[in-house]
Structures are given as C-alpha cells and as structure tokens.
Amino acid sequence: MNVKIELCMGSSCFARKNSRVLTDLEAFIEENQLSEKIEIIGHLCMNNCSGGPVIRINDITYLDKDEKEIRELIEVDLCR
C-alpha cells in the first residue's frame, strides 16, 4: 500500500463530513483503479471530536477537511 487512510466513523465526525468523505474516497479509488495503492481503515473514535471530522493519512492527522482537500492530499502522497 502506498497510502493508508484512517477515518473517524464516530457519530460526530461521521455526521459532519466523514460520511461524504468515505463515499467520495470509495468512488475515487474505483474510478482510478487504486485499490492496490490505497487502504481505508475506519475507527469508532479518534479522540478529537471537537476538531473533527478527523482523518489520518499516512500517520498525519487532519481536522475538518472536505472531500476535495482529502483528494488533493492523497494525490500528493501517491506521487511520492
């Protein structure tokens, strides 16, 4: 795997944006045939509810990012 993405699936983060981020990530992976390069892991809570939604990409934690920002971060990591 080139990119490991961890998403908080707790109720606060999931309701804020992570439900849309997850749907968008799955579509992005399928559209670009990246299933061998990207791993998505869900967590019940990533312990930063007030700053969420919480997303960790290759051990770097990001707060309050939308689908477009997450795609851009992933594309950068894929190019490394």
Image (cartoon, helix red, strand yellow):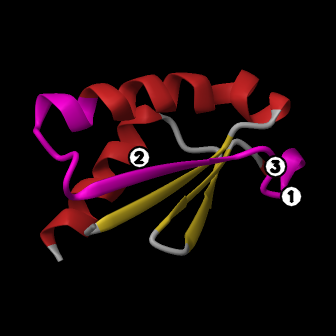
Q: Residues within 10 Å of mark 2 (few under 14, many from 20)?
A: some
Q: Which mark is residue 47?
A: 1
The correct choice, above or below, for 1 with respect to 63 in the image is: below
Tell me which residue sits at (52%, 22%) in the image: 20
Q: Position of residue 33 (x, y in %)?
A: 11, 39
Q: Position of residue 63 (x, y in %)?
A: 66, 53
The correct choice, above or below, for 15 with respect to 73 in the image is: above
Q: Position of residue 4 (x, y in %)?
A: 41, 63
Q: Earlier in the sequence, mark 3 or mark 2?
A: 3
Q: Which residues are magenta?
A: 28-50
Q: Marks 3 and 1: CB-CB under 8 Å?
A: yes
Report, in whole angstroms, how far the alpha carbon at label 2 lies from the one at label 1: 20 Å
Which callout, 2 or 1, points to the residue nearer the camera? 1
Q: Residues within 10 Å of mark 3 (few under 14, many from 20)?
A: some
Residue linked to disc 2:
70
Quarter the C terminus occupies:
bottom left
Residue linked to disc 3:
45
